Amino acid sequence: MKRKPVSLGKVELDQPLMTASGTAGYGAEFADYFGLHDLGAVVTKSVAHFEWPGNRAPRLHPTKSGMLNSVGLQGSGVDHFIEHDLPALERAGAKVVPSIWGHSVDDYRVVTEKLAEVADRIAAIEVNLSCPNLGGDHTMFAHDSRLAGQIIEQCERFGVPLWAKLSPNTDLLVDIARAVLAAGSQALTLVNTVSGMAIDIGTGRPTLGTGRGGLSGPAIRPIAVRCIYDVRAALPNAKIIGVGGVVDAESAVELMMAGADAVQVGTATFADPKAPAKILKALNKWADRRGITDWSQVTSAAHRA
Ligand SMILES: Cc1cc2nc3c(=O)[nH]c(=O)nc-3n(C[C@H](O)[C@H](O)[C@H](O)COP(=O)(O)O)c2cc1C
């Protein structure tokens, strides 16, 4: 059954499912497993305007219902992305959404300016705000309405549609969502990983090289659902992309019913690189069986029940 495209501000997606940033590299690696053009979009690993080595190992630690990571945004920088990764994604027919990060408001501005030079080759930019402000008091941009708003305001002027990706590790989520929308973000991506830690009881030391890391996978789905639900209740007209613990059609539907217009799949791809394509197929079957002609019939259903 053909359904209406999903509208996220100026961006339209043929399908309501995409990859989550950082869990599929820069995306083209996945072209060997399924047609990237079948997905709504491919959101890449976050890229800065500079090369960055990331965190010290170990960087990944599996948990019973997900994983902890402290990859630390390792990457070759935006020039390398534009020269090598973007063409590979284009060859695979993907709708490309680069994710960006930085240490300061100005870092975000610089990387956006560079991506604006290839604006006709990308659909939007996802702004990963879960990064410490090294130019200031080291608080996360995503935990501070003023700074989060400033970043979006600086980047918005280049004219590429922005999606602000927010953190669940704050009780100010709704305020921050309001601030980034007021500053010009066209959509919200909810949520990034949940701050966590694990200890190796043999050595008594943290399992990750950095101590703390980000928890992802099914363990965080109820947190993602609560965040999406709260933001949707406060901001009925916001465009929301849900992410956190999507592993099958049912979990994708759960995030949509909480208020997401579209969803992303991250950690599930570590167990099965074909997960995004398989989940999307199952999601469409789920909708076909129910005669759903428009994804908006699913989005926010929990608020109407
Ligand atoms: C190994 C790994 C790397 C990640 N890298 C990024 C990143 O570069 N930028 C970003 O915004 N989120 C990053 N994330 C967070 C995911 O995009 C997603 O928000 C989170 O994992 C929750 O979704 P999931 O449960 O489907 O994995 C990363 C997650 C993992 C597990």
Image (cartoon, rainbow, N blue to C red):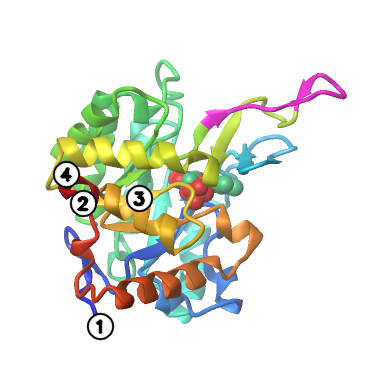
**As drawn, is 19 to the left or to the right of 155?**
right
Q: Quick check: marks 1 and 2 in contact, CB under 8 Å?
A: no
Callout 3 amino acid: Gly
Is label 3 within 8 A of ligand 1 (CB to nearest ligand atom)? no
The range drawn in magenta is 195-206
Residue 184's tag is 4
Choose between 158 and 101: the one closer to the eye: 101
| C-alpha span from label 1 to label 4 | 31 Å
Q: Earlier in the sequence, mark 1 or mark 2?
A: 1
Q: Earlier in the sequence, mark 4 or mark 3?
A: 4
Q: Earlier in the sequence, mark 3 or mark 1?
A: 1
Counting from the top left corner in percent of width and height, residue 123 is at: 30, 65
How packed mark 2 is, by other alpha carbons closer than 10 Å (few <14, some 14-19, many 20 or more), is: many
**As drawn, is 59 to the left or to the right of 219?**
right
Counting from the top left corner in percent of width and height, residue 58 is at: 74, 37
Please give the name of the residue rendered at 29% of the width and 27% of the height, measured from the top-left corner.
147
Residue 207's tag is none
Callout 2 amino acid: Lys
How packed mark 3 is, by other alpha carbons closer than 10 Å (few <14, some 14-19, many 20 or more), is: many
| C-alpha span from label 1 to label 2 | 22 Å
Mark 3 = which residue? 242
Mark 1 = which residue? 2
Counting from the top left corner in percent of width and height, residue 119 is at: 29, 64
Mark 2 = which residue? 239
